[in-house]
Image (cartoon, rainbow, N blue to C red):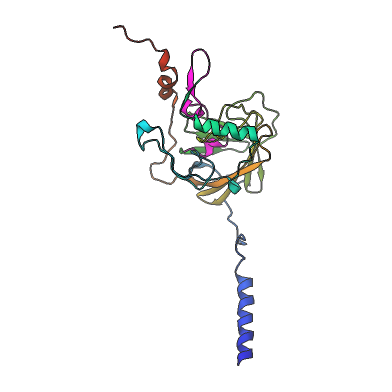
Amino acid sequence: MGKSFRVLSQAMVWASLIILPAAGQTPALAYKALRLPGTTNPNLNGLWQALNEGNWDLQVHGAQPGPPQFGALYAQPPGPGIVEGNEIPYQPWALAKKKDNFEKRFVRVKYDAFRFIPLDPEAKCYLPGVPRATYMPFPFQITQGNKKILIAYEFASASRIIPLEKVGEAPIDSYMGWSAGRWEGDTLVVDVTGFNDRTWFDRAGNFHSDALHVVERYTPASPDILRYEATIEDPKVFTRPWKISFPLYRRLDKDAQFMEFKCVPFTEEFIYGHLRKQAAK
């Protein structure tokens, strides 16, 4: 009886190993996205949004106070981070600069003879750059064609055109870079170069140089979820490439629509107010 029980138990264990995938393995039946009509490529069209705290700080962080005069109004929410391994491999000088950026993020720094401006480019309504535009707390719209993909972002009316054909070098450095797309199976891969050095990755002062190179990957995981990854390389600032990853969610609320956040008028007094002529007494 004991022998029969042991044999039966072993058989059940082996059956469970055959039927159930090992922990961490992807099920055999992977999600198959709907195709863009007339193509063999997945249809990524829609209004998408990240739900994380990466815009405040890419790495694991606790809650932080904002400027004291505003109480809790501009405090930073805590977040588990979106950097894989939670390490940004700065060169020593660059880590010191990142810390200085954070300490001075609310400080008006003399830019030229006429302007005293804050360090954080978001405060100045600069275009947010890549990948930051993807995880800012605003939705963005993907409009997909056979040969090009347009991504429009609410913040500062930023946008990108991603050709799916071979393109040359970036004609000029810019805030949003120069994008070249291709398909690897159901994953849209976007290679982005040609950046200037005027954007940050977040409000925590994480920064880059004009040698930034970003490779993005958009992979459908369900009808309403995209897996997003971005590999970041900058030999002037970092010791090695590093990666961020998080899901993007389709906006399904009844009245969801792409709207505008034209923030330039909100920054004029902040940046140039000290130049305004005072009213005569």
Q: Is residue 68 above or below residue 40?
A: above
Q: Is residue 23 above or below residue 7?
A: above
Position in image of residue 60 (x %, y %)? 52, 46
Q: Quadrant of residue 211?
A: top right
Q: Is residue 127 magenta?
A: yes
Q: Quadrant of residue 194?
A: top right
Which residue is outermost to the left?
281
Nearer to us in this view, 273 or 25: 273
Which residue is outermost to the bottom?
1
Quadrant of the frame with the N terminus: bottom right
Q: Residue at x 47, y 32 (%)?
A: 155
Magenta-drawn segment: 110-136
Which residue is outermost to the top?
280
Quadrant of the frame with the C terminus: top left
Nearer to us in this view, 144 or 265: 265
Res 151 seen here: yes
Nearer to us in this view, 103 or 73: 103
Report the number of discs. 0
Q: Is residue 164 magenta?
A: no
**193 relative position to 124: left or right:** right
Q: Residue at x 50, y 48 (%)?
A: 80
Position in image of residue 143 (x %, y %)? 54, 37
Q: Residue at x 41, y 41 (%)?
A: 256
**164 relative position to 227: left or right:** right
Position in image of residue 7 (x %, y %)? 64, 85
Res 200 seen here: no
Position in image of residue 162 (x %, y %)? 61, 34
Nearer to us in this view, 272 or 205: 205
